[in-house]
Image (tube, helix red, strand yellow):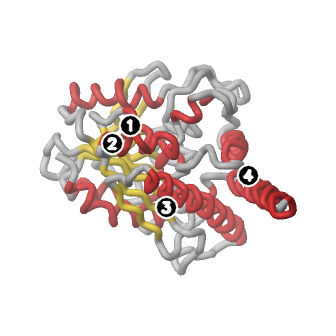
């Protein structure tokens, strides 16, 4: 009996070490290093929409629905290496063109590298950050009401989706702001942040993506903010709210679309495979948690192949689109 227990502890330590190693790999490399969707580019139909906040002026990109309606609105959240000029959704995909053709207004916040789109407890003391991240407040207060007052967009019953960091954040926004977000989509999200090794891995990942100190985000590991932002823990809120969810992840296996054109692509692909394997384990754990509380109003989509990259996330938007459209406006 003792031998079996010791073996179990060893296995747990090895699994935790594997999670740390995978998460320590650069989160955004997989999304940037391999060739993006053919023809993806800045969409001239988008407008720069600046809103003041406690973080200073923040830009979002807004794409209006083809039929001119103001009722149907969805927010698209970026990943860990979010840039300050354009969202990765605009740079690397065509979703801003496709969703607007479905008569959906698209809002793409710009910036927020390593933020998890949450309200932090302090500025990071490891990279010279001067203002405290307050992305949850920005998205649910500053931006929300500015879109209503200046563009007439519906502030209620919106959708939100995101990849990786943005996927986890999309579920948190829907859990704590159900009047604003009735629909949430997570692609390759980290949905079991309290799992062994995850906090240590995320610490290394934030240092790699911008030099951020994760203690400035949700405090030390024992701070209750960690549990507040863990989808595994707040799943009952999503059930209580009746939020419609679309949860998707690949399995870490690359496919024919992952073309290797340069030596560094091999490195990037290896990173993306490892990260997606972690996302898969997190998503399976989240679904088990959901099943234990009686289920959610959710679609879980596990693709037969798929790594941590824009091709697969764009595919998921299009697969989700009919369901999203049916629940907006």
Please name the residue that numbered disc 1 is placed on: 60
Between discs 2 and 3, the one toward the N terminus: 2
Please name the residue that numbered disc 3 is placed on: 310
Please name the residue that numbered disc 4 is placed on: 20
For residue 177, side relative to residue 192 (left or right): left
> What secondary structure is marked by label 4?
helix
Please name the residue that numbered disc 2 is placed on: 107
Distance Cα–Cα, label 2 vs label 3: 18 Å
For residue 237, side relative to residue 104 (left or right): right
Q: Is residue 53 above or below residue 11?
A: above
- Front label number (3 vs 4): 4
| Residue 117 locus on image (x, y percent) | 49, 36
Distance Cα–Cα, label 1 vs label 3: 20 Å
Asked where in the image residue 32 lies, by quadrant, the reply is bottom right
Between discs 3 and 4, the one toward the N terminus: 4
Distance Cα–Cα, label 4 vs label 1: 33 Å
Asked where in the image residue 137 lies, by quadrant, the reply is top left
Distance Cα–Cα, label 3 vs label 4: 23 Å
Residue that appears at 53% across and 60% down: 284
> What secondary structure is marked by label 2?
strand
Residues at discs 1 and 2 in contact (Cβ within 8 Å):
yes
Q: Is residue 233 above or below residue 263?
A: above
Between discs 4 and 1, the one toward the N terminus: 4
For residue 146, side relative to residue 229 (left or right): left
Are there few (<14), some (14-19), or many (20+) residues within 10 Å of tag 1? Answer: many
């Amino acid at each position: 009996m003792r031998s079996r227990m010791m073996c179990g502890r060893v296995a747990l330590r090895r699994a935790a070490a594997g999670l740390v190693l995978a998460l320590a790999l650069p989160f955004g490399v997989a999304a940037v290093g391999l060739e993006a969707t053919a023809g993806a580019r800045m969409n001239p139909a988008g407008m720069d929409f600046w809103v003041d906040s406690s973080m200073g002026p923040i830009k979002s990109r807004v794409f209006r629905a083809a039929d001119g309606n103001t009722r149907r609105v969805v927010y698209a959240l970026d990943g860990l290496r979010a840039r300050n000029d354009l969202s990765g959704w605009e740079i690397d995909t065509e979703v801003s063109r496709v969703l607007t053709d479905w008569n959906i207004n698209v809002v793409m916040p710009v910036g927020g590298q390593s933020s998890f789109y949450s309200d932090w407890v302090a500025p990071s003391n490891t990279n010279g950050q001067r203002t405290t991240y307050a992305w949850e407040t920005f998205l649910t207060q500053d931006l929300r009401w500015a879109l209503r007052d200046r563009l007439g967009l519906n502030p209620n019953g919106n959708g939100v989706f995101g990849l990786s960091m943005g996927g986890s954040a999309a579920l948190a926004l829907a859990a704590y702001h159900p009047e604003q977000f009735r629909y949430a989509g997570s692609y390759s999200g980290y949905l079991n942040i309290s799992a062994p090794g995850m906090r240590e891995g995320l610490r290394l990942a934030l240092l790699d993506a911008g030099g951020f100190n994760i203690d400035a985000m949700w405090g030390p590991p024992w701070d209750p903010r960690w549990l507040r932002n863990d989808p595994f823990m707040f799943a009952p809120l999503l059930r209580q709210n009746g939020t419609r969810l679309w949860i998707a992840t690949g399995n870490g296996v690359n496919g024919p679309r992952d073309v290797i054109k340069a030596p560094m692509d091999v490195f990037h692909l290896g990173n993306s495979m490892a990260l997606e394997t972690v996302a898969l384990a997190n998503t399976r754990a989240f679904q088990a948690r959901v099943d234990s509380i009686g289920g959610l109003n959710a679609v879980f989509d596990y693709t037969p192949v798929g790594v941590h990259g824009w091709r697969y996330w764009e595919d998921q938007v299009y697969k989700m689109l009919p369901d999203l459209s049916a629940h907006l406006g």
